């Protein structure tokens, strides 16, 4: 149910991202009041989509396909395990207490780390290893070129927990996609002048090669000078759509069981 609610609630992003973007690009009326009827129609269509498709898609993807493919949903799985441990107190009080202690310790450690890390960035949170190499190597440009693509270590308890719940296959899939996007496609686009970066410290000669390749703002990234992230946005969306419909096509027989 959480998955269905999240997917349906995602339709509201149209109102906080897509519609403001349309006004920014001057694709709507100068006065938003003139678009009242259009916005109402869009709201009705979005609501109809949520009510008409959320329930059948939940039954297909969550009940049938997820069971067949043995998919793991991290947050609901963790919640279910916690509730099961709490209700196991009648038959295994000692074991239940140990589980609750472990949960409390993990929660406390994650909370303390997140709060303290705000005052120790670079030590307890973001490890910019290649920036360190850049400084230690007396401003070796090779290291800063790797740092430009966001390759660092971030000690995020939430992501560590998700990785523990989802398993190695999913984690390797995310890692593989990151390598393809930000170690192969992105650098190749920049090398062939098909995508461009933005200097972060343009006036400092030592840090002149320190670039940002993740901009989506129109001032730094547009159709004339797109950033690698700007360039890969729509191909990435297309891949997600193709994979979803392919999975739907390949698993259509699952619902028969």
Image (cartoon, helix red, strand yellow):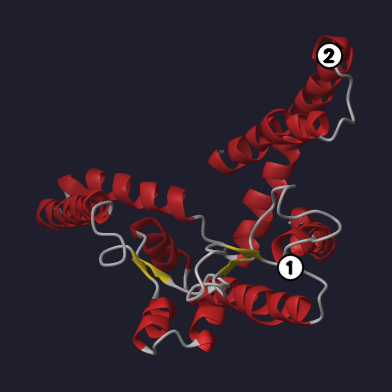
Seen from the viewer's position, the closer of residues 11 and 252 is 11
**Apparent side of residue 31 relative to residue 197 in the rendered image (left or right):** right
Marks 1 and 2, the one that precedes in the sequence? 2
**Apparent side of residue 88 relative to residue 250 in the rendered image (left or right):** left
Seen from the viewer's position, the closer of residues 170 and 174 is 174
Q: Secondary structure at mark 2?
A: loop
Which image quadrant: the C terminus? bottom right
Q: Height in image: 189 above or below 257?
A: below
Which numbered mark, 1 or 2, is in the foreground of this view?
1
Residue under label 1: 196
Residue 57 locus on image (x, y percent): 73, 43
Residue under label 2: 31
Q: Residue at x 19, y 51 (%)?
A: 112
Residue 66 locus on image (x, y percent): 62, 58
Q: Residue at x 65, y 41 (%)?
A: 7
Seen from the viewer's position, the closer of residues 201 and 178 is 201
Q: Say which quarter of the image contains residue 195.
A: bottom right
Q: Residue at x 23, y 45 (%)?
A: 86
Q: Height in image: 16 above or below 158?
A: above
**Apparent side of residue 74 relative to residue 20 in the rendered image (left or right):** left
Q: Which mark is residue 2?
A: none
Q: Height in image: 110 above or below 122?
A: above
Q: Say which quarter of the image contains residue 16.
A: top right
Which image quadrant: the N terminus? top right
Q: Residue at x 60, y 59 (%)?
A: 67
Residue 220 locus on image (x, y percent): 71, 54
Neighbours of disc 2 within 10 Å: few (<14), some (14-19), many (20+): few
Q: Secondary structure at mark 1?
A: loop
Neighbours of disc 1 within 10 Å: few (<14), some (14-19), many (20+): many
Residue 14 locus on image (x, y percent): 74, 33
**Apparent side of residue 133 relative to residue 202 in the rendered image (left or right):** left
Q: CA distance from mark 1 to mark 2?
A: 35 Å
């Amino acid at each position: 149910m959480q998955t269905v609610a999240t997917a349906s609630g995602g339709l509201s992003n149209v109102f906080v991202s897509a519609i403001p973007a349309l006004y920014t690009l001057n694709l709507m009326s100068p006065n938003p009041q003139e678009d009242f009827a259009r916005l109402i129609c869009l709201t009705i269509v979005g609501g109809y989509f949520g009510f008409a498709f959320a329930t059948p898609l939940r039954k297909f993807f969550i009940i049938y396909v997820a069971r067949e493919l043995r998919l793991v949903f991290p947050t609901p799985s963790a919640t279910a395990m916690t509730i099961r441990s709490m209700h196991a107190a009648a038959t295994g009080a000692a074991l239940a207490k140990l589980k609750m202690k472990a949960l409390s310790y993990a929660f406390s450690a994650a909370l303390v780390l997140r709060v303290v890390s705000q005052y120790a960035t670079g030590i307890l949170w973001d490890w910019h290893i290649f920036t360190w190499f850049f400084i230690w190597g007396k401003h070796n440009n090779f290291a800063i070129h790797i740092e430009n693509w966001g390759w660092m270590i971030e000690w995020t308890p939430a992501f560590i927990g998700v990785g523990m719940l989802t398993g190695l296959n999913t984690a390797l899939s995310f890692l593989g996609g990151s390598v393809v996007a930000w170690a192969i496609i992105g650098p190749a686009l920049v090398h062939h002048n098909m995508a461009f970066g933005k200097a972060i410290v343009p006036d400092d000669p030592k840090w002149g090669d320190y670039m940002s390749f993740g901009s989506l703002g129109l001032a730094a990234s547009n159709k004339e000078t797109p950033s690698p992230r700007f360039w890969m946005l729509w191909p990435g969306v297309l891949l997600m759509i193709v994979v979803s419909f392919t999975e739907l096509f390949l698993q259509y027989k699952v619902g028969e069981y």
